[in-house]
Amino acid sequence: MKLLFINPNISESVSALIRAEAVRSASPGTEIDVATASSGVAYIETRFEALLGAHAAAQIAAERHERADAIVVAAFGDPGLMALREVLPSPVTGLTEAALASACLLGRRFSIVAISQRIRAWYAETVDAYGLGSRLASIRGLDAALPDIGAVQGTQGERLVQLALHCVQHDGADVIVLAGAPLAGLARDVADRIPVPVVDGVSSAVRHAETLVRMRAGKARAGSFAPPPAKAHQGLSPEIARLLARAHGGGLMQD
Amino acid sequence: MKLLFINPNISESVSALIRAEAVRSASPGTEIDVATASSGVAYIETRFEALLGAHAAAQIAAERHERADAIVVAAFGDPGLMALREVLPSPVTGLTEAALASACLLGRRFSIVAISQRIRAWYAETVDAYGLGSRLASIRGLDAALPDIGAVQGTQGERLVQLALHCVQHDGADVIVLAGAPLAGLARDVADRIPVPVVDGVSSAVRHAETLVRMRAGKARAGSFAPPPAKAHQGLSPEIARLLARAHGGGLMQD
Amino acid sequence: MKLLFINPNISESVSALIRAEAVRSASPGTEIDVATASSGVAYIETRFEALLGAHAAAQIAAERHERADAIVVAAFGDPGLMALREVLPSPVTGLTEAALASACLLGRRFSIVAISQRIRAWYAETVDAYGLGSRLASIRGLDAALPDIGAVQGTQGERLVQLALHCVQHDGADVIVLAGAPLAGLARDVADRIPVPVVDGVSSAVRHAETLVRMRAGKARAGSFAPPPAKAHQGLSPEIARLLARAHGGGLMQD
Amino acid sequence: MKLLFINPNISESVSALIRAEAVRSASPGTEIDVATASSGVAYIETRFEALLGAHAAAQIAAERHERADAIVVAAFGDPGLMALREVLPSPVTGLTEAALASACLLGRRFSIVAISQRIRAWYAETVDAYGLGSRLASIRGLDAALPDIGAVQGTQGERLVQLALHCVQHDGADVIVLAGAPLAGLARDVADRIPVPVVDGVSSAVRHAETLVRMRAGKARAGSFAPPPAKAHQGLSPEIARLLARAHGGGLMQD
Amino acid sequence: MKLLFINPNISESVSALIRAEAVRSASPGTEIDVATASSGVAYIETRFEALLGAHAAAQIAAERHERADAIVVAAFGDPGLMALREVLPSPVTGLTEAALASACLLGRRFSIVAISQRIRAWYAETVDAYGLGSRLASIRGLDAALPDIGAVQGTQGERLVQLALHCVQHDGADVIVLAGAPLAGLARDVADRIPVPVVDGVSSAVRHAETLVRMRAGKARAGSFAPPPAKAHQGLSPEIARLLARAHGGGLMQD
Amino acid sequence: MKLLFINPNISESVSALIRAEAVRSASPGTEIDVATASSGVAYIETRFEALLGAHAAAQIAAERHERADAIVVAAFGDPGLMALREVLPSPVTGLTEAALASACLLGRRFSIVAISQRIRAWYAETVDAYGLGSRLASIRGLDAALPDIGAVQGTQGERLVQLALHCVQHDGADVIVLAGAPLAGLARDVADRIPVPVVDGVSSAVRHAETLVRMRAGKARAGSFAPPPAKAHQGLSPEIARLLARAHGGGLMQD
C-alpha cells in the first residue's frame, strides 16, 4: 500500500518530520511518499495561508494521486481536504480529521496544543466545521516567535508539555492532541509526562488512511462527495483539468 | 466610491448579470467594477470548484484591490472571503454573507432557493460556517440541467418562484434568498409573486459594501483577521507576494 | 428618506446622543426623527425594563410610523423589534440587530462592551434569540454606578476602552460592539485605540435602515411576520387599534 | 395557598376554562384566582399580540400579586414571564414553562399540538428561548378559523387528537403537550385515545406553582433575576411604579 | 400515596439523609420508602460506578415497584432513570432531573455545586443528555477527600457555600443546585446565605413525583418509552424477568 | 494482537456473525475472541435492554480483559463503553463509536440504517451523546418483526438496501452506516448497489481497535477517564471487585 502525504507548505524540514513519523507508524508493507508544496508559506496559521495551501495541495494531488492508494493532507487544519475528497478516486484524510478521529476513540473531550496563538482561531473553526465543537475542551498555543519551524520540538518541547498539563488540570481534557505537522512525532517523546492519552496527527493519519484503504468502502457516486458535475472550465493546470475530466468521465473545455 | 466585484468563475454572461444588478443597486457616486476569473469553472456547485474559485478570487484581489474601496466575492458560497478579509486592507464581503445579513434584518428564518440539487450541501455548510444554521428554514434547488448558466433566469424563472412558494408554505420561511450570481436581479422581477421579502445577493452586497466603506470601522491589526504574520514564502504570484508583503510591512522571501 | 428612531426610555439626554450620531451617519437626503418614550425608565438593563420599553416603543410606532420610511428601536436589546416587524408596513430594525449585522460583515467573533454588569444577561439572551451565540466572544460591562446616563461616555470612556482591549486580547474578539444608546457615537472617538473594527449601534442602524428602504424587499403577507390575523380586541390605545386594523385591513372591535 | 392565574387576553370564556381546570387540579387548600386582561386581543398567536399581552399581564400582576402566593401567566408562550420573575417577590411560572417541565419529567421528546398554523413560529421561539429545542419533536396546529375561541375544544377536539397521533407516529414524540389556554382541560378527555402521556398547561402550572411555594427556594437578590436596579422612571401606572419601588426598596421618581 | 426512593449506592448513612429530607418535603398523606443498594459503591462519581448503580437500581425497582405509586432514582446523575421509565408502569424521576426541573422554574441559568472534582464530567454529561446544556452556568466541586460520605454536610458545608457564592458572582448563575444525595437537606440550612434560589434534589424529587402521580398523564404505550418489545431473554433475575414479562404482557423465555 | 469482542446479548447466532466479519477484517496476526452474554435479551432496542447489556458487558470485560490487547463492545449503541473505558487498562471501543469514526473519515453527513423502528430513538441518543448530531442525516429502520435475529440479513437484505438508497436520495447522506451486530458483514455484499461509501460496525471496530493498540496513546491517569477513585464497595462480583481494585491499586472492602 502506498500513502501520499502532501505537505501544503514549503518547509522541507517539516516534510522530513512528517516522513519520519509516518514511516515509524506505518504497518509492514505500507510505503510512505511525502510531497512538499513548491509554492506557499513556511507554515499555515491563518485562513489566507490555508487558501494558498489548499490550492497547492490540489495541484500536488492532481499530479501524483494515481501513484497512491490514499492521500493525506499533511497540515493541521486540513486545507482542501473536503474538496479533494470529492474529486479524487481514492480515500483522503488530513492531520486534523485523523487526529480528532483518534481522540474521539480515546476519550470524550480533547484539547489541542498548538504552535502559536494566532493559529487557534483557524483550528477552532476547523473543529467546528467537523461538527466536533462539543468535544473540544480548549486550544492552547505557544506565544513565542518560531524562526525555525522545523526545530520547534527542540526549542519549545518543554513549554508544549506545560500547556498540555494545563489543559488536563484546568480545561477538562481527557485527551491531548499535539497539533501541526511541525510537532509530528513529539507525542512519542512526551506521552509519559502527560497523564492522559496523547494523539499525533501524522501517525493517526497513517493508521486511518490504511484503514480506509482496507475497508474498501467505495467512492461516492452520488451525494455531496460525488465528483463535481461535468461543466465548462478554462485556465486550469493540465493536471487539474485531467483530474476533473477523469472524475466525471469526460468534461467540457470552453473555448 | 469604487466597488470591485470578483466573479470567481469564468462565465462572462454571469459577470454581465452581476454588473447590471450592481449598477442598478448602487448609490449615486458608487462605481462598479466587475472582474471575471481567467481560470476556473462555469459556475461553482461543489467544494472542489469552490477551492478553484477561491484561488482565482485571491489572484484577482491581489491584482486589483488597490483600485477599489471595497471588494465583493461575487459567487454564492463566498469562496475565499474570510481569507481575503485577513489580507486585504479594505472591507470585503460576499454574496452569501451579504444576502444573509439582509435576510436577518427582514425576518427570523430564511430559505435559500438555488440553481441545482448538488449545490445544496455546500450552501448548507456555508450557512453553518457563518453560525446561522438556526435561522435557515430550508434550501431548495432546481433539478434541471443548466447548459447555459447565463440564461437560467429566463428558462427556470417560473420553477424558481414555485420553489420559493413551497419554502414559504411548507418550510416556515419568513424571507426568501434567491441564491447565486446567475440569479442576480431576479428578485426584482418576481418579488410581487412571493408573499415574503425576497433578497438578492448582488444588491445586498452593493449596499452592505457601501455601508462598510462609510462606517470606517477600521482594518483589524490584532485578532484572527489581522494580516498573516510575516514568514518565509516562495512560488507565489508576484501580486500575491506583494499583497502579503504589504499586509505585514515587509515579508521574507525564502531562497 | 425619513428614519424614525424610537428611544424606548425616558432619557432626553440619550435621545440627543442618538440624534447626533444618526445625523452624522445618515446619507445625504436622509432625515432623522427621534422620539423619546413618555413612560418608562432611564435606561434598560433588565427583562422587566425591556417589557416596559417594548410597550412604549409600540405606542410611539403606532403614533408616528406613517411619517417614516423605516423605524429603528433605539435601545440595545431591541425591545419590541420582532413584534413591530409583524405589524408595521415599513421596515424596522434595532440597535442590536443592526450592530450585529455590521459585526458579522467585519469578522467572525464579536465582543459586546456594555454599560453595566447587570445588563449582560439580557444582552446574552438577545444575541441567542438572534441565533448568533456561536459568534459571540464575550460580553463585558462597567461595574460603576451611572447616576447620569447621558454622561457615561465622558466619565467612563477610558474604562470602556480597557474593556474592549481585554476582549481582543483574552476573549478572541475580531470585532468590538460598543453597546447601548448611551454610547452612541463613542466608536468614532476610540476606534484608533482599539486594534480591531469597532461597531456602533446607531450608525449601523442608520445604514441598514437606509438599505432596507432602498432594497424594497417587500412586507411579509405570509409567514410569521405577516400582520397579526384579524380578531377581537379591546382596551387598546386608539393608535394601536388603528395599526392593527390597518395591518389586516379591517379588524373586529369586541363589544 | 392562593394562586393567581393571569389571562393576558380579553376572552372571559377562556378564563372560565382556565379556572375550571385549575380548580380541578389544585391540591386541597389551594385557592385559584383568575384575572382577565382588560386590554388586548382574543387570543395570542403572534409576537405583537404577545407584546400586548405581556404588558397587560404586568399591569395585572402589579395590581394583584400581593394577594397571591404564586402567579401564573396563563397563556401559552408565557408573555412577560421572565420579566415578572425579576420584579415580583413571589414565584411566577407560565403555561409553556410549566407544561414543558411536566413533559421533560415524562419522556425525552415532546410535540406541541396547537390551535393554529400561525402560532407555531412563536411557540418554536418560546421553546428555543427555554433552551429546550433539542427536546422538541414537532409543533402541529389546526388550520381552521376559530371564530369562538372558547369553544375550540368542542368543535376541533377530534382534529386535535388526530394531530397528536400524527406527532407520535411520524415525529417521534414521547409526550404530547396540548398547548394554549383555550385547550385547558382537554387532556383529561382525550388522554386514553393517545398512546403517550398527554400534558396540559393549566394543571401543570397549578402543580408546579404549588411546588414553588412549598419549596421556599427564595427570591433572587443577585444575578439576572434580582429586582431591577433603582433608577429614574416616569409615566408608569401607579401599580407598576409601586412594584418597582417595592422591588428595590425605594426607587427614584424623575421630575 | 407511596414514593419509593432507590439509593443505588450502599451507604446507609446517605439513605438516612435522603429519608429525612424526603419526609420533611412530602405532602400530607405521602409515605416515603427508601431502599439501599445491596451491591455497589459508597457514592457514584464516575461512569463505571453509575453503570453499577443503574443495575442495582433496576433490581430494586423490579423487586419493589409494585408497592409504590412513583419511583425516584436517588442519586444525582440518575443512573438507570431513562431505562426504568420504559419498563415501569408507574412514573419515575431522579434527583438530577427533578432538581433541574425546579431550577428551570426558578431562573434561566443554574450552577451545580458538587461533592468532588471528579464528579463534574459525569454531571456535565447528564445535563447535556437532558438537552439543558445551554442553561448550565457552571459546575463546581469540592477538592477534599471524603472519607465519611454521610458527614460531608458537616465537614464541608462552609466550603460548599463559598462555591455557590462563586457561581453567582462569577459564573452568571441565577439558581444554585446543591447536587448529590449526600447533600440532601443542606439547601434548607444555607439558603439564606446564598442570594439566589437554592434547589435540593431530594425535595424536588418528592414534589415532582407527587405531581406525576396526581397528573395521571398515562404510561407510554407507543414511542420510545413504551415497554421493551417482547423477545427472548435468559439469565435475568426472576424479578427483572417478571418486570419484562409484565411490561409486555407475556415475554419469551429462551431455552 | 488479541481483540475481545463482547456481544452483550444472548444470541449465539449474532456472535457468529460478529466473529465471521471480524476475522475477515483483521490484519495478519490479529486474533479475534468473541464472548456472548450469559444473561440478557436477544438483541437490544431500548434503553432498559441497554442497561442489561451494559452490566453483562462489564462482567465479561472483568472476567476476560486480561487476555486481550483491546476490547470491543459489540452491539450498536455501545452499552457500557464509556464506563469500561474508565476502568479497563487497555483500549476499548464499540460498534457505534467505531462506525461513526469511519463514517466521519469518508464524508460529512451519514445515515444509519437499522433493524427496527423502535431502535431509532436509542441510536439517535447515542449519536447525540457522541456530539455528532450535526453530522447525522437520518436514521431509518425496518418495520418488520424479526423472529430470528441471526437471519435478518437474508430475510431483510433487499429492504435494507432500499432504505439506504432512500437516505442518499432524500436525506442528504454522504455515507451509509449499516447498524447493529446482526448486520455484521452485510456491507460487503451490498456496497456496489449503494452509490456512497457503506460502513460496517464490526470491521470498523476491528480496524480502529488495532489502531488504538498500535498507537500506544496511553491509559488516562487523570481526567474523567482515569480509573474510579478507591472507595468502599460491597456485593460486587469477584471479577468486578478485582477490576476496581486493580484499577486503583488497592480499594477498600466495606464490612
Image (spheres, coloured by chain):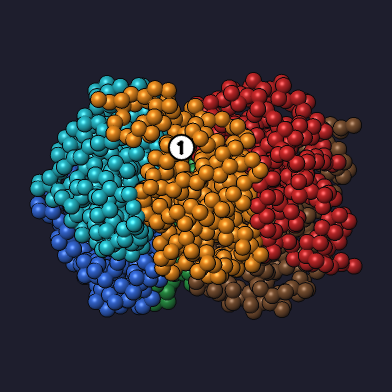
Chain colours: A cyan, B orange, C red, D brown, E green, F blue
On screen, residue F87 versus residue B101, left or right, reads left
Determine the secondary structure under disc 1. helix
Q: Is residue C199 left or right of residue B249?
A: right
Q: Please give the name of the residue rendered at 67% of the width and 69% of the height, measured from the top-left corner.
A: D116
Residue C2 sits in quarter: top right
Instruction: Answer whether residue A36 is visible to the viewer in this image.
Output: yes
- The answer to whether residue C112 is above or below residue E220 is above
Quadrant housing the C terminus of chain A = bottom left
Residue D98 visible here: no
Direction front: furthest residue: A255
| F129 versus E246 height, above or below | above
Q: Find disc 1 in the rendering and name its residue.
A: B64
Q: Nearer the viewer, residue D69 or B243?
A: B243
Q: Is residue E204 above or below residue B240?
A: below
Asked if residue A185 lies left or right of residue B112, the reply is left
Coordinates of residue B230 in the picture (x, y in percent): 37, 25
Q: For mark 1, does the 10 Å Cα neighbourhood hold few (<14), some (14 to 19), or many (20 or more) residues?
A: some
* Residue at horizontal 74 percent and vertical 73 percent from the top: D146
Image x and y of residue F11, in percent: 25, 68
Q: Quadrant of residue A248?
A: bottom left
Q: Chain of mark 1?
A: B
Observer-nearest of F109 and D83 = F109
The residue depicted at 52 percent of the width and 44 percent of the height is B33
Which amino acid type corresponds to the residue marked 1 in the rendered image?
Answer: Arg
**Residue E66 position in % (x across, y down):** 49, 66
Residue A119 percent coordinates (x, y): 39, 33
Q: Measuring 28% from the left and 53% from the top, which residue is drawn there?
A: A241
